Image (cartoon, rainbow, N blue to C red):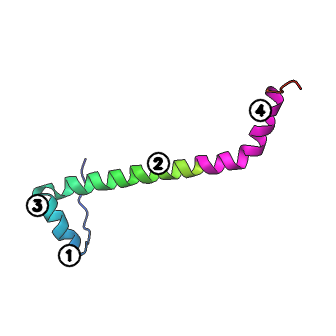
Amino acid sequence: MNRRLTITLPEQTVRMLDRAVSRGQRSRLIDEAVRRFINDQGKANLREQLELGAKVRSERDREIGEEWFVLPD
């Protein structure tokens, strides 16, 4: 199901849009751009959360590793 939206874009953006696609294809391009942006943002946020989690849990993980992999002297 499609919904009609009224959006306002800067004139320069509209000119770029018109150079990229025909007038009948504007919605498709905007849909693809929004989907790609949201997907990329989601991946960036997930990457950031994973990095933060790894830093927060690094000491715990090191201690667990030492318990499991004790090397003989």
Q: Is residue 58 magenta?
A: yes
In the rendered view, would you say 40 is above or below 7? above
Please name whichever residue, 62 or 27, is drawn nearer the observer in this view of the structure.
62
Please name whichever residue, 3 or 19, is drawn nearer the observer in this view of the structure.
19
Q: CA distance from mark 3 to mark 1?
A: 15 Å
Judged from the image, the secondary structure of the residue bearing numbered disc 2 is helix
Q: Which mark is residue 65?
A: 4
Instruction: Identify the residue shown where x is 33% and y is 51%.
Output: 35
Q: Which mark is residue 11?
A: 1
Say which label, 3 or 1, has the lower sequence index: 1
**Residue that carries the numbered disc 2 in the rendered image:** 43
**Residue 26 sits in which quadrant?**
bottom left
**Residue that carries the numbered disc 3 in the rendered image:** 23
Residue occupying the far bottom of the picture: 11
Please name whichever residue, 2 or 71, is drawn nearer the observer in this view of the structure.
71
Say which label, 2 or 3, has the lower sequence index: 3
Q: Specify the amino acid type for callout 4.
A: Gly
In the rendered view, would you say 5 is above or below 65? below
Q: Which-is-in-front pick, marks 2 and 4?
A: 4
Instruction: Identify the residue shown where x is 59% and y is 50%.
Output: 49
Q: CA distance from mark 2 to mark 1?
A: 31 Å
Q: Specify the amino acid type for callout 1.
A: Glu
Q: Which-is-in-front pick, marks 4 and 3?
A: 4
Mark 4 closeness class: few <14, some 14–19, many ≥20 residues within 10 Å: few
Q: Which-is-in-front pick, marks 4 and 1?
A: 4
**Residue 37 sits in which quadrant?**
bottom left
Q: CA distance from mark 4 to mark 3?
A: 60 Å
Instruction: Identify the residue shown where x is 18% and y is 64%.
Output: 17
Judged from the image, the secondary structure of the residue bearing numbered disc 3 is helix
Task: For the C terminus, give its image quadrant.
Answer: top right
